[in-house]
Image (cartoon, rainbow, N blue to C red):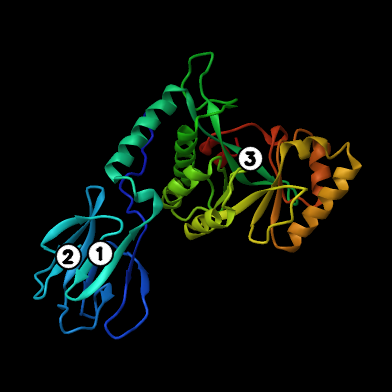
Amino acid sequence: MPAPAILESAVPVATIRFTRPDASSEETMRLSPVPFVIGRADTADLRLVSNRVSREHAVLSWEDGQFWLRDLGSTNGTFRNGTRIEREAVQHGDVLRIADIEIALWLDQSCLLNQRELASKLRSWQEMLLGRGAAPGFSPLCDLRSSRIGGCLAVACDTHLSDGSSWPAPGLKATRLSRQLHWLMLARAVELARELPAGMPVLLTLEDEQDAERWTSLLGRLAQGRELVARLPLTATSHDRLAGMLRDQGIRIARQLDLNDAIAEDCDQFWLSKECCQNVAEDESLWAALGDQVQTAGGLGADVVALDVCTEESAHVFGELGCRWAAGPLFGGPRTACELASGG
């Protein structure tokens, strides 16, 4: 099996903070598109109206895995941390100066690692993933209202096959991965999602808060417009902060539905725990409590997902409760993106 290509050339999310000569308050602007031209001309990506700023004063570009600032022959100079430069690599937290206007450069959390180091780590983890015989699979997500497959849950699969044939193959089996390999699996799943039908959302399980904060933007960049829904880590202590980072990347938010907690209003989707899904049909009190929670979630515009659904009876139960989506053995085991796209 050929090694999957990790998107290493994507420009990381970066912002600049500055105060215009004719204003008193600070502005924040996303560094896009790249190359990003700063100057006095109407065509500049950042237009600074000052006689000390040249028409095309400087340009920020992305080359060889890092940002570079280059002076474009300006009269009054381009500076990095107080030193006049012609062309120099710039990093998170640097203070740039265009003539007499200071600009602070801020990179997304995932970019605090040197990008070359990041690419090297991704390649290393990729080899470890392949060495474990693991690859991302997609568990079908059934719309309980229409009985159609309308999404998928990304899962890590064991691809070691008893007959020695090559991957992909039917009957992928879910497996557990280390934290690092789990994140590589998610990244690869988001890449492979381009093979899925347009409009089919991909659900992701985030397992570690620190890793989620560090690598969230990687998933956002790989998505390329694909709808992603990420369930926040069960052990997260800063739900609001992490949810904000995900939303900044265009990723929708899911939480596990906990009967002991109030329904969060900032959530797009709730997942029922496997324990709830296994016991709801036999436990009337659980049925009633879940019904109230599902109704409350629906009133807030959030869908509810039932997991590990094994029988038509349980699927009917969750449909009656008001759940929108269900995943589990009833709808088939993990499949490749191509198999899911073709209805295999």
Which comes sooner in the sequence, label 3 or label 1? Answer: 1
- Which residue is rendered at x = 57% and y = 33% of the image? 335
Q: Residues within 10 Å of mark 3 (few under 14, many from 20)?
A: many
Amino acid, disc 1: Val
Circle 3 is placed at which residue position? 140
Which comes sooner in the sequence, label 3 or label 2? Answer: 2
Amino acid, disc 3: Pro
**Measured Cα–Cα span from mark 1 to mark 2:** 8 Å
Residue contact between numbered discs 1 and 2, judged by CB atoms under 8 Å: yes
- Rendered image quadrant of residue 78: bottom left
**Measured Cα–Cα span from mark 3 to mark 1:** 48 Å
Amino acid, disc 2: Gly
Q: Residues within 10 Å of mark 1 (few under 14, many from 20)?
A: some
Which comes sooner in the sequence, label 1 or label 2? Answer: 2
Q: Tell us which disc is closer to us: 3 or 1.
A: 1
Task: Specify whether 113 is left or right of 274.
Answer: left
The numbered disc on residue 95 is 1
